[in-house]
Image (cartoon, helix red, strand yellow):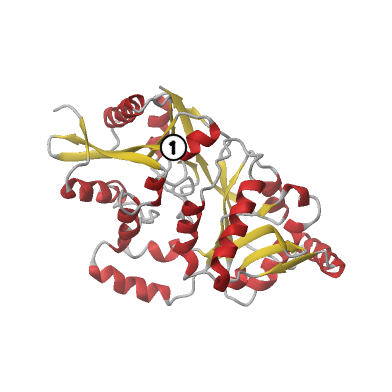
Amino acid sequence: MSAVEVRPVRSAAERRTFLLFPWRIYRHDPLWVPPLLPERAARTDPRKGVFFQRGSAEFFIAWRGRRPLGTICAAEDRAVNAQRGLHDCMIGFFECVDDYEVAQALLDTAGAWAKAHHLQTLYGPFNLDYEDSYGILVEGRERPPALLCGHTPLYYQDFIEGYGFQPARGDNLAFAIYPDFSSPEFRLASRLADRLRKHGTITVRGARLDRWDEEVDNILVLLNKATTHLVDYIPWQRAALEEMLSTFRTIADPELILFAEVKGQAVGWFPAIPNLSEVFQHVNGLRYPWDYLKLGWYMRRQVRSLTIKSVLVLPEYWNMGVGVLLIDEMARRMQGKGYEWVDLSLTSADNPATPGLAERLGAKIYKRYRVYRRKI
């Protein structure tokens, strides 16, 4: 058997091989949700991807002869490293066949790239975005992932940990909530929310999509003030945030993108969007022209679930009932819209307030993801 050779992506043909490689790993996995190829192609293009405004990256393919066996990306987020005083090399797009020799060759290559760029630690996996396909799936392979969440084979965890990576922080959790509005927990939350409404200090409104720049500014402030207490807090860059939000602007229901305000100032954010993984699971990543026809057909069907990616409250308002008021308002608004359950992903085990609140409302953990670090 010939040796494994890892080479950087140089040609258009190699780039296509890199982008399509996941289909080799997951083609027989019914739970996999293929990435949308147009979006992924743009994200990994230095001329178009927002990441390249603040960092650099290189993409690699592992080969045995003419057969591709795996992929990886090594990247430097210069803005985040400078802000946090770190020397991290972000790894991502890590996919490989069930062969540790291939995984080792890919990770060795990422380490060599990091050394050449004077970096000290491999960190990830993330796909050039700290919110996209976060980490390795370590628990919960019974159902498909929600929007922006990853799905990895069981052996990836063994390969990463066998290479010497250590967990960078506590696991990030995905919760499933099947609202029972008649339960004692929801009734208690509703009574408390009604008292808060009568008091009038905190108000809740939907998103103002016609004032887009203002809303992005509000969310940026909330993200960067409400998450500083988390382990491995990473400041958000406005361009990256706007790129992510713009992706969902056309599908968002502004009535379900909630802001809590005190005297006109945004103090909380609780956004729910249709969980389009239910659609994307059936459209093959828009790989072929006819997949767009399938996309149109599935988009006309009722999506069964919402996904909520953030529950943000400014620290000075943590004990004022903002979270309870937002959750109760969301429950009231989603009734009658046809949604059956809510995905809450991802929330860190290092942030006990959100998991605790979710569990009091009957939420159950259905997936765990883990991010890793390894000194070079």
Residue 279 shows in this picture: yes
| As drawn, 114 above or below 338 | above
Residue 96 shows in this picture: no
Q: Residue at x 63, y 71 (%)?
A: 334
Side of 32 where 147 appears, left or right = right
- Location of residue 155 in the rendering, given as x and y in whole percent from the top left corner: 38, 36
| As drawn, 174 above or below 124 | below
Residue position for label 1: 78
Q: Quadrant of the N terminus?
A: top left
Side of 216 where 107 appears, left or right = left
Res 66 quadrant in image: top left
| As drawn, 59 above or below 239 | above
Q: Residue at x 60, y 62 (%)?
A: 271
The residue closer to the viewer here, 6 or 173, is 6
- Location of residue 245 in the rendering, given as x and y in whole percent from the top left corner: 50, 60
- Location of residue 373 in the rendering, given as x and y in whole percent from the top left corner: 47, 29
Q: How many C-alpha atoms fall within 10 Å of the one at disc 1: few (<14), some, or many (≥20)?
A: some
Q: Residue at x 29, y 46 (%)?
A: 25
Tag 1, which secondary structure?
helix
Res 2 quadrant in image: top left
